[in-house]
Amino acid sequence: MESLKGQLLIAAPMLVDPNFHRTVVLIMEHTDEGALGVVLNRPTELPVGEAVPDLAELADGDPVFAGGPVQPQAVIALAEHTGPVGEESVVGPIAPIQVSDDIEQLGGRVARVRVFAGYAGWSEGQLDDELAEEAWFTEPALPGDVFAGEPDTLWSRVLERKGGEYTLVARMPPDPSQN
């Protein structure tokens, strides 16, 4: 099995589960035991300053994003590091902030942070099955995808970038019966 770490999962139109309809998920871990990722295009109304006050300045006014339906009270923070990140890298300079990281010293090491409440998780073989059912399209992630402005249009933009037949999918209305 090839790891999908650093890949985007783009929900296919047939994926109507409200947790994932028209989502873009960044895969942070993918092993034989399962996979974990965060939904990149579901901002909430909750300011980071209220949820994680220590990260408010680095989040630069961003809200908390709904990272997925698993453990919605859990916080995952992804940072764009200004120096090397090594094996912790998810994509380029993007890596999670670790519990052991000194928040006060992060300002000099990271350019920005995005905070997620919850995550998307798959048990052993579950993601592979969903990919075989064509519930997801894959695309290599770009560091800018994590911090994309206008997250509501990220699904369409990533499909457009993928090109070919995916360009047509990107232009589908949210309700295909209105096509």
Image (tube, rainbow, N blue to C red):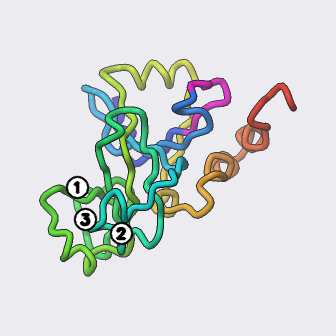
Secondary structure mostly seen in the magenta stretch? loop
Q: Amino acid at mark 1?
A: Glu
Viewer-nearest residue: 154 or 51: 51
Residue at image position (79%, 37%) is 173
Q: Which residue is the site of mark 3?
A: 85
Tell me the magenta residue range.
10-17
Relative to 14, residue 6 above or below: below
Q: Is 160 a magenta residue?
A: no
Q: Is residue 50 above or below residue 133?
A: below
Q: Quick one: SS at disc 2?
A: helix
Q: Secondary structure at mark 1?
A: helix
Q: Secondary structure at mark 3?
A: loop
In the rendered structure, the answer to whether residue 146 lies left or right of residue 91 reads: right
Q: Is residue 14 located in the magenta-colored stretch of the structure?
A: yes
Q: Nearer the viewer, mark 1 or mark 2?
A: 2
Disc 3 marks a residue whose amino acid type is Val
Residue 115 position in % (x across, y down) = 38, 56
Q: Earlier in the sequence, mark 1 or mark 2?
A: 2
Q: Which mark is residue 56?
A: 2
* Residue corresponding to mark 1: 87
Q: Please name the amino acid that badge 2 sits on.
A: Ala
Q: Mark 1 and mark 2: span between their CA atoms?
A: 26 Å
> Mark 2, residues whose alpha carbon is within 10 Å: few (<14), some, or many (≥20)?
some
Percent position of residue 133, x then y = 55, 18
